[in-house]
Image (spheres, grey):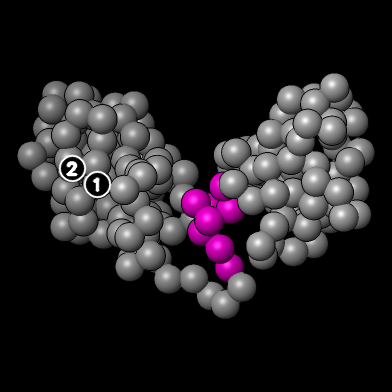
Amino acid sequence: MDRFIVAKIGKTVGLKGELKLHLLSDFEEQFQKGVNFETDKNPLTIKSYNPQRGLILFEGFESVESAKTLTNLYLYSDEEKTRKSCPLDEGEKYWFELIGLEVIEDEKSLGTIIDIDRIGDIEYFKVQTSDSYKHIAKTFLIPNIDEYVIKKGDALYTKDCMGILEQS
């Protein structure tokens, strides 16, 4: 099963082994005591998480020295785990459901979503440009805001994104 990044572990804070947690997900509720996450090194189990301060503590890493070995690691989840722990409201989609969607504007394909990035408070769809427009740019970014995104369904339907592509 494919896994994807949900957070990045930052530097240690204080003397108890707490670490700054940089969320790369909209679902903060998945970071609960006892929940396991995969990393590129070893699985980690949350001992505590303080959402107000953005601090996390992992079992077995309760000292500054041991916690420092986790700095800059990514926490991964997968589709099954995410669907169980992070229910959506009607009409909402998970990021992994948006990857691969065709971007349609005025009945023309601008390309395919290949990634989603968050810059500041805004999510951006990274689009691999369709062959018809590769002479303009190979990829471009579409902000996930109502000004540009009309509908997310079997495709991502947009408006005014051709202008973004032309300026890329």
In this view, the residue farthest toward the front is 131
Q: Which residues are magenta?
A: 92-99
Q: In which quarter of the view is residue 139 placed? A: top right
Task: Give the residue at mark 2.
Answer: 44
Disc on res. 113: none
Crowdedness near tag 2: few (<14), some (14–19) or many (≥20) residues, C-alpha within 10 Å: some
Residue at 53% x, 56% y is 97
- Name the residue that disc number 1 marks: 37
Residue 13 visible in image: no
Tell me whether the residue at label 1 lies in contact with that at label 2, contact meaning CB atoms closer than 8 angstroms.
yes
Circle 1: element type: strand
Residue 110 in view (yes/no): yes
Instruction: Using the numbered discs, state the Cα–Cα distance from disc 1 to disc 2 in whole angstroms.
Output: 5 Å
The three-letter amino acid code for the residue at tag 1 is Phe
In percent of width and height, residue 31 lies at 31, 55
Determine which quarter of the picture holds residue 4: top left
Quick one: label 1, few (<14), some, or many (20+) residues within 10 Å? Answer: many
Residue type at the position of mark 2: Leu
Task: Indicate left or right for 109 with 75 as reference.
Answer: right
The correct choice, above or below, for 143 with respect to 90 in the image is: above
Against 82, residue 103 (above or below) is above
Give the percent coordinates (x, y) of residue 113. Answer: 64, 43
Q: Residue at x 68, y 42 (%)?
A: 112
Whether the magenta-drawn stretch holds residue 97 is answered as: yes
